[in-house]
Image (cartoon, grey):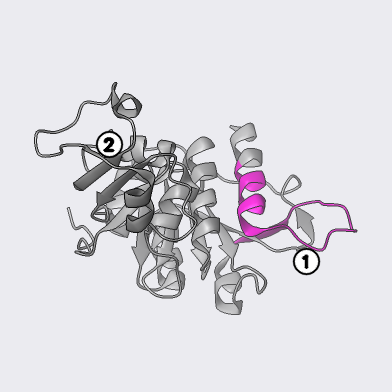
Amino acid sequence: MKRQPQKSQGYWIYGQHAVMAALENPARKKLQLLVSDMRDIADVRLGAQLKPIIADRARLEKALPPGAVHQGIALSVLPLEQPSLHDFIDSTAGKKHALAVLLDQVLDPHNVGAIMRSALAFGADAVIGTHRHSAPESAVLAKSSSGAIESLPLIEAGNLVQAMDLLKKHGFWAVGLDGSAALTLRETTLPEKIMVVMGAEGSGLRRLTAERCDYMARIDICPKVESLNVSNACAITLYEISGRR
């Protein structure tokens, strides 16, 4: 299978949920583990090459970004090797239902991490962004995903419109979220293989991306609220789709 090349630069994952998920992921390459209390990892089976290091708060905070909520645990890792878009298509070829979340220039790693958490919770098969103008795997993204990045592919495509066209050729239909759409998501009839396309914070979907969507839908919210944060909108959308299945 073709896989995206692994980036060589490592980073620190921190916080209980994110670190424990990474420790339990055999595909994650782990470099160094810092813990303030060995009891926090007592139930985790570590590889022979990974020896935990007892670290006080000062050492943890020196290794991590300012203000990181580490909960006494941090893990140095290499970025995950992610499947390619073709790998993803192959993996869903025999499925009756398939669901992907496509992100159109969503740059905030907090939002991408939260979207990954919702995507995993509601049965999505992958989150797909682009090589450029997208939030790459990082400490903030991993923390915000609360470990979801260890279980759900975060795929990079060269061009989002071309990725949409390729997915369409393999049975996917594109549903774009837009606050000005005529129909609400609940009023929209959805097919069995779906790509939910979410736009950037503030600007929404780009014109070419919107034009490639087969359906445009909005979330029915109180008129006193102009719009929702992209991660909240994605969670509501995935919940609605999950409920229909």
* Neighbour tally class for label 1: few under 14, some 14-19, many 20 plus, Cα within 10 Å: few
Residue at the location (45% across, 56% down)? 140
Residue 237 lies left or right of residue 218; in this view the side is: left
Residue 212 in percent (x, y) is at 55, 69
Residue furthest to the left: 48
Front one among 182 and 39: 39
Residue 162 in percent (x, y) is at 41, 71
Front one among 78 and 201: 78
Mark 1 = which residue?
180
Residue 108 lies left or right of residue 132; in this view the side is: right
State which quarter of the image contains the C terminus: top right
- The answer to whether any part of residue 223 appears in the image is yes
- The answer to whether any part of residue 89 appears in the image is no
For the residues carrying marks 2 and 1, which lies nearer the camera in this image? 2
Q: Which element is circle 2 on?
A: helix
Residue 193 in percent (x, y) is at 49, 46
Mark 2 = which residue?
23
Q: Amino acid at mark 2?
A: Leu
Residue at the location (52% across, 55% down)? 173
